[in-house]
Image (cartoon, grey):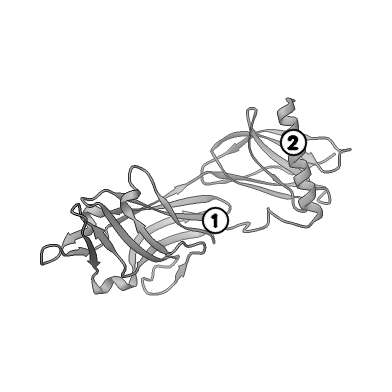
């Protein structure tokens, strides 16, 4: 084993022991829930700036347009300049843990503080249709699985969303948004025995340590890692016990891989 890897294992083991004996738990927090990030991006339009007032982001697991809506935690309310979010750039609007299931719809709730800046430098308030107060709704029908990280991208088409309204220099906002879900990786979970002994768990791809965690009463969970094949190193807090290595652990995009129980000995 190289010195750099040995040092990393030692440091991770120290962290594992510290957290275990202070009763902190990383593995059980949000365990079994899907991790959803909602990001906003943009197709360009013929303006210097387009400011959108985002007030809330909701999801719905039901088929009802009127009921079942729930706000996402970790939401960042504010005004966003869409024209800074072009060329594959985006900004995260919400970062939440949600229940597994099928997300039927998402709703982007906009306020009244929406503006465009023309190429002449004029700031013009965007008028919005009266029916827009309930939010912009998008059909998704996307399945989410517990312990997997997903990214939902809302692609706001500026060119199709902003129209001249009546008198010259007036503009109307009728949002045209495309939404698509991306699984950002898979996860590895498992159990070590005896559960009274804490252990550091490292996932290696070749010689590179991709992710690490520690057991909590024998349980561990490593989230959000790329699809591929990994080697797991289990390092007990009891230095009289040996490091256990499990190779050939395959991670699939959007799924949770369960590893057979590892006995610390």
Quadrant of image for the C terminus: top right
Q: Residue at x 74, y 43 (%)?
A: 200
Residue 54 position (above or below residue 265): below
Residue 255 - label:
none
Label 1's element? strand
Single out the mark in the foreground, 2 or 1: 2
Q: Residue furthest right?
A: 240
Query: Gap in Å between the C-alphas at discs 2 and 1?
Result: 29 Å
Residue beneath the point at 82% across and 43% down: 237
Mark 2 is surrounded, within 10 Å at the Cα level, by few (under 14), some (14 to 19) or many (20 or more) other residues, namely many
> In the image, residue 25 lies at what x, y percent?
72, 56
- Percent position of residue 4, x then y: 71, 29
Instruction: Identify residue for label 1.
Output: 34
Say left or right for 18 vs 74.
right
Q: Where in the figure is residue 72, as x and y percent of width and height?
A: 48, 64
> Do the residues bearing badges 2 and 1 touch, measured as CB atoms within 8 Å?
no
Q: Earlier in the sequence, mark 2 or mark 1?
A: 2
In the figure, residue 57 lies in which quadrant?
bottom left
Residue 171, quarter of the rendered image:
bottom left
For this orientation, the residue located farthest to the left is 167
Mark 2, residue position: 9
Image position of 36 (left or right of 187): left
The correct choice, above or below, for 8 with respect to 131 in the image is: above
């Amino acid at each position: 084993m190289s010195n750099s890897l040995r040092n990393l294992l030692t440091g991770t083991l120290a962290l594992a022991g510290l957290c275990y004996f202070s009763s902190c738990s990383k593995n059980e927090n949000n365990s079994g829930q899907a991790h959803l990030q909602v990001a906003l991006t943009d197709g360009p339009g013929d303006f210097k700036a387009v400011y959108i007032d985002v007030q809330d982001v909701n999801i719905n697991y039901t088929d009802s347009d009127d009921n079942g809506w729930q706000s996402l935690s970790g939401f960042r309310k504010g005004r966003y300049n869409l024209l800074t979010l072009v060329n594959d750039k985006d900004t995260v609007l919400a970062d939440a843990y949600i229940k597994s299931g099928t997300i039927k719809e998402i709703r982007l709730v906009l306020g009244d503080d929406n503006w465009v800046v023309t190429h002449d430098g004029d700031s013009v308030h965007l008028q919005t249709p009266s029916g827009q107060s309930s939010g912009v709704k998008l059909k998704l029908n996307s399945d989410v699985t517990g312990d997997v990280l997903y990214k939902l991208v809302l692609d706001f088409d500026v060119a199709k969303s902003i129209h001249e309204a009546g008198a010259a220099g007036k503009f109307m906002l009728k949002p045209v948004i495309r939404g698509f879900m991306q699984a950002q990786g898979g996860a590895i979970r498992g159990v070590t025995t005896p559960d009274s002994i804490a252990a550091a768990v490292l996932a290696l791809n070749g010689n590179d340590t991709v992710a690490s965690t520690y057991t909590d009463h024998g349980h561990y969970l490593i989230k959000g890692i790329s699809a591929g094949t990994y080697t797991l190193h289990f390092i007990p807090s009891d230095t009289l016990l040996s490091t256990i290595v499990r190779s050939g652990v395959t991670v699939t995009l959007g799924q949770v891989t369960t590893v057979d129980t590892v006995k610390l000995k």
